[in-house]
Image (spheres, rainbow, N blue to C red):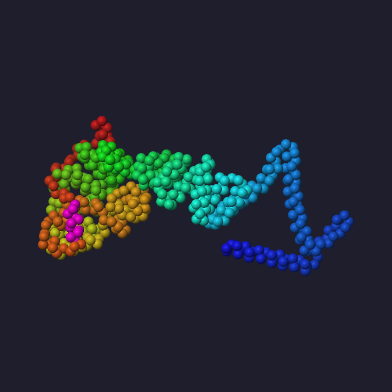
Amino acid sequence: MLWSLIKILLFVVVVGALTLGAEYLLESEGGVQLTVAGTEYTLGPLQSVIAAAVLVFAVWVLLKLVSFLVAVWRFLNGDETAISRYFDRNRERKGFQALSEGMMALASGEGRLAMAKAAKAEKYLQKPELTNLLTAQAAELSGDRKKAEDTYKKLIASETTKFVGVRGIMKQRLADGDTDTARKLAEKAFQLKPKHEETQDVLLTLQAQAQDWSGARKTLSAKLKNGNLPRDVHRRRDAVLALSEAKEILNDENSIDAREAAIEANRMSPDLIPAAIMAARSYIEKGKPKYAIRVLKKAWEVQPHPELAAAFAEIAPNETPKERIKRFGVLTRIKPDHPETRLVLAELNLAAEDFPEARRALGDLVDSQGDARALTIMAAIERGEGAPDAVVKGWLARALNAPRGPQWVCDNCQHAHADWTPICKNCQSFDTLSWRAPSAAEVSSATGVQMLPLIVGSLEDKSAEEDVPEAEVEVVDAAEVIPPTEEPIGPPIVEENPPETVEAELAREK
């Protein structure tokens, strides 16, 4: 509407300018004198301008006539397509002009105008492989999804534009949330252009969301082969997919395959904590604790984690608390100042009822970190040392409102997860979870206190339980649900001449 008004105003301005110019020429003196065959002609200013315009037009018509006569002469000399080519050149010129104007309109966000120019270009050019693409994109821009889909289907009919049509419909299905159909279309587009990076990324994400781990690993290998993925990133993500595949095998109760897949995932990415845990437990089941220790130590060097400590405890489940403290020195000596190391040491000393040593291990974490796990351990230390109930309740009350501590947080959307998953449950991003403290805790960590053997319930005090508010009782009960670790536990394992690598020893056994 606004553009139409502007064109009307421009037309009025041009007509007014021509009128004023003609009036000025009529009032002007002088002119042009022409002598033709001895006859002299005098033209006034306005007549001179009109004569010049007529002359230009006459020259243009003459050139066109000469060009047509040349085409006719060629036709008469045996060139049967000379006349048709003459008219086709004019049509092509108009068609390409309309096509360029349509592309400019599309870039300017004028969807309706771009569709009109595309229709005009199709009329002159008769090249749907060019005009259909412009029509489809213009229809999407203007919100006409039905026309866009119909046009994409026309593109699929041609071998030269099939990929563009499949990709366009795939994007529409993704926008509609139809991921199953979008995945099938992405697989088809990948077959047509296996080196197309965007198609590889879309297919990989959809396969991971559908838990097609085997297909996702093939797509990931294609990305590496075509140079669209650094080798170190490929190794990490392939380990993530192998780990996810191992979990699926484990759910199917194929324990041997699952163990081998977990070991393979850990070999590809030793710093992947879930893979290290699965591999360690696999070695424990196979009666190879030294291998399990080596796997967990390597992962602990990268990132101390409570689940790594839990898996390390499973190596010798029948040892005493004192023996466990001694055996855990293999881990706690690696990063002694790390908060996770200090929390594990505090929990182990709580299990051994060495409350002063537990307090020393905890140190200033209550003030510097102040998460729920540290505060709950502090409450257990105070109760173990015989502090008044008010002191214990005060620590527990602080723990209720404290941050949950490190969790599996998505680096893309910052959503916190209770357990590690290859796909973020909130934004569906692949391999974006990292173990860190979220900016605002959303869920409580399922592993935050799983190593905690003693909070309040282990030292029974029935009189104190009667005075604890309902909210505090929930904290105590949650701690008591955790399996205690105060069973008699076997002697520590001492590694003598350990093999350089797990794979080397496996090779020697074979």
Judged left or right of residue 331, residue 40 is: right
Closer to the camera, 90 or 269?
90
Q: Where are the magenta residues, as a range?
A: 472-482
Percent x, y of residue 67:
73, 46
Horizontal and vertical percent position of residue 453:
17, 52
Task: Say if 163 sits above or below 114 in the image.
Answer: above
Image coordinates of residue 225 in percent, x first then y, are 42, 39
Instruction: Find residue 28 and report its image quarter.
Output: bottom right
Q: For this view, does 334 lie left or right of residue 92?
A: left
The residue lying at 45 percent from left, 41 percent from top is: 188
For the N terminus, the image quarter is bottom right
Name the one closer to the observer, 56 or 12: 12
Residue positioned 47% across, 47% down in the render: 169
Q: Quadrant of residue 23?
A: bottom right
Q: Residue at x 74, y 42 (%)?
A: 72
Q: Which residue: 75% across, 58% down?
A: 53
| Residue 423 placement, left or right of 125 | left
Based on the picture, tell me whether residue 477 belongs to the magenta stretch: yes
Q: Position of residue 471 (x, y in %)?
A: 20, 62
Residue 468 vertical placement versus 221 (above, below): below
* Residue 335 visible in the picture: no
Outermost residue toward the bottom in this view = 27
Image quadrant for the C terminus?
Answer: top left
